[in-house]
Amino acid sequence: MWKGVCKIMKRKKKSSPGKDIISIRFLSVVLMSFVLILALLGLLYHQFQKAFLSSINRANEEFVYQVSATSSSTEEFLQNMVNQIFYSNTVSKLRSYEELTNWQVVDGVRELNTYSASSTIIDSIYIFNGKQQRVYSTSSYGAVGDSFSAFADRDAVALFENRSEAGRLVPILRHSDVSNIYSNRELYSFLFFELDRSGLPKDNAIMFNISKNWLNRLYFGGEDAFIIKEDGVLVASSAQEGEELYPLLTEKILSRTGEGVDSGYFIYQAQGRQICFFSRMPDRPWYYVKSLPYDQCLEDLRHTEEQTFLFVIAGFGILLLAGTMISVDIYVPLRKITRRISDIAPDAPQNTDAMLESLNHLIESNSNARQIQTSLRAMVRGEVLQGLLFGSQEYESPEALIREYDLQLLSDRPIRLCLIDGLRLPLYLECVRDGQARCEGVIVHNEYTILFLQAEQEPQAVLDRLSAQFPARWFVVGTEAEDFAALPRVYGRLVEFYELRFLYQNGPMLFVQDYPQLDDSPAEPEARVSDVIDALKKGYGGKAGKAYLEFLASLNGKSGRCVQYAWAALSGAVLKLYFECFPGEADPDGGYQTVSESLRFSPEALNGGCEAVFTRIAEHIQQKKASRKGSSLDQVIAAIEESYCDSNLSSQVLADRFNLSTAYLCRIFRQAKGCSLTDYINQLRIARAQEILRDPSVKVKDVAGQVGIENKQYFFMLFKQTTGVTPKQYQIQQRGV
């Protein structure tokens, strides 16, 4: 009995090492997994801290670039505007001649009015002539030209008097009750003048008055920002914070700039945590300052951080669950097997490596593992394809890249890109591959799908099949890319055409090769914009609609940048004219958002959204002209009947007197009286001549001058044409009566 017990004890002692080896290995794997997860969490936390700082620095770099671009474009705009107006022939006469004729004054002011009316931001223009000590203005308040001492805008007079070299093209914020559209509002004024050889201002200057809201939009683009000088003086602002924050931010900024820092950021507390970015403007000794909520600036990164930590926690839970399942399904049976082997054959070697190798083989052959592997490969393939489109994918050779990621492409065959405005990638690939064509695809920005086509022949059959199966989708087909390196260029043009697809009526399938080179010149669209605005100002809604269709036609074949510029010019000019007609809707609560959305570049705007705005403007101007037409015509007729005997009376004189164009005056006069304005004046003169000739003592040769006709032969001809007899015959007839 004792011998049996000893045998059993020896057997247990012999079996212990095998069991302990498996237990130690399993526990080591579990422990190492926990340590690895903790290390991963620590690494993630460290990386996110670095990412936070990197995000702020990247935002600051983007801000510095934005400031440079905004400042340069604004300075270029102001300089171009100055050069165009200041050195105009008629304006040069207006500001520099010691004496001017009425025609020169009228031409100069008329040209200023043309610039002011066609610009989307200019409120009014003042011209100072030092030789005459006069100021000429496009403002609707006061006279067109006034002496320096009598000019209504006294603040402008003071600015003209105190001008200096440092004040050229510097925005000056001031409150004015002299403006074209509104009264009692804030303006920015810009002075420009030439300097003599000694560096002093010459005796003439020009002033542009720009609405504060428009300049803020030009400088700040709707952002919460402001501009200060080197000494901390506020230049311009669109910021919403209270005035008490400006000293705080300015003090912090000046302390940084005093250390030689031209751009940077800092964090401060004001109704929550805020980030303040500042950067020196390239062309002036000013600093552009922008403030953002801290959470808003890093919102995307915080969201990513939360999602990643949730993913790690979920992965940790899955790992625990997998460990439990492995323990139940693998470790416990393995323990039973090894224990059974030890009981049966205590001296048998414990070949755990062979068992682990068998288990690994089982796991790799499991269907779930294959599905995970397939999903990961598809996800990585999408990243690779996007990298090829953006030019960011690195690779040794096309063949190696295709082999590594199992791409369904050939390295020695051209690739044709096709953009589809849908996200059903698996169905698109299935449709294409049914036609024996090699193809890959990727969804970009969750907005559209890009297909990489390699058809053995022309891909038209494949495209026709796609179009037939998905008739509601747009297809933009690019030119062939000879290799992977050409894909970013082809993709860039593809996206440009996709953004402009609404302009092309031969859709929904566009071929980039049909438009070999997009034109970047805005000359023709700008001319069509002028036609639209001219028609609207005259109240011609139908003509404006026709000009608008010509404008859309002029955009065909234009580049994306040119189209955006032309559309901005049209919408800006229409918005300005609209709010001149309906000033009550200029506020955000008064319909501004609705009108702006109607003019935004979109399919809705192209398909009739703009025409509704055109119709309202035209109807308003027609009503205004109709009401003004009656009163103006009565005044004109009264003036004619009062001074028709004046030889200088003419349609041009009357048009200038009542601030009307000659063509418009003659047209409304003929519509009202049924005859021309000149014929009406002549009728009154002949009727007066008949009255004079009834006096037998009057000499016929003196009558023409008395009724305002200097040419006697013309008087005799006109009298006979009207009465049927000569003046002398008429006088003789009256004696008989």
Image (tube, helix red, strand yellow):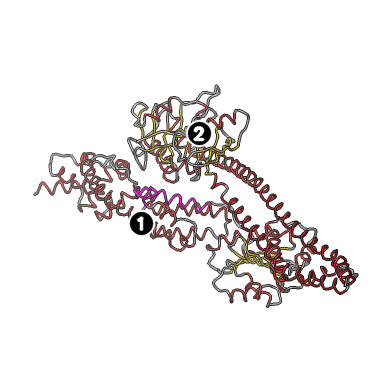
Overall secondary structure of the magenta stretch?
Answer: helix
The image quadrant that residue 157 belongs to is top left
Q: Is residue 55 left or right of residue 543?
A: right
Can residue 492 be seen here? Answer: no
Say whether marks 2 and 1 touch (CB < 8 Å).
Answer: no
Compute the Cα span from label 2 to label 1. Answer: 37 Å
Q: Find the magenta span and give its range.
A: 565-590
Task: Give x and y (percent) for residue 126.
Answer: 41, 34
The x, y position of residue 151, in whole percent, is 35, 30
* Residue annotated with mark 2: 169
Q: Which residue sits furthest top?
A: 198
The residue indicated by pointer 1 is 616
Q: Is residue 678 left or right of residue 271?
A: left
Q: Was residue 587 drawn as part of the magenta stretch in this picture?
A: yes
Q: Residue at x 62, y 65 (%)?
A: 449
Q: Which mark is residue 111?
A: none
- Name the amino acid, label 2: Leu
Q: Amino acid at mark 1?
A: Arg
* Above-or-below relation of 707 to 335: above
Q: Relative to 583, is 14 above or below? A: below
In terms of secondary structure, where does tag 1 sit? helix
Of 535 and 395, nearer the camera is 395
Report crowding for label 2: few under 14, some 14 to 19, many 20 or more residues within 10 A (C-alpha). some
Examine the rendering and report whether any part of residue 467 can be seen. Answer: yes
Magenta run includes residue 316: no
The one nearer the camera, 334 or 645, is: 334
Q: Position of residue 399 (x, y in %)?
A: 80, 64
Q: Quadrant of the N terminus?
A: bottom right
Numbered disc 2: secondary structure: loop
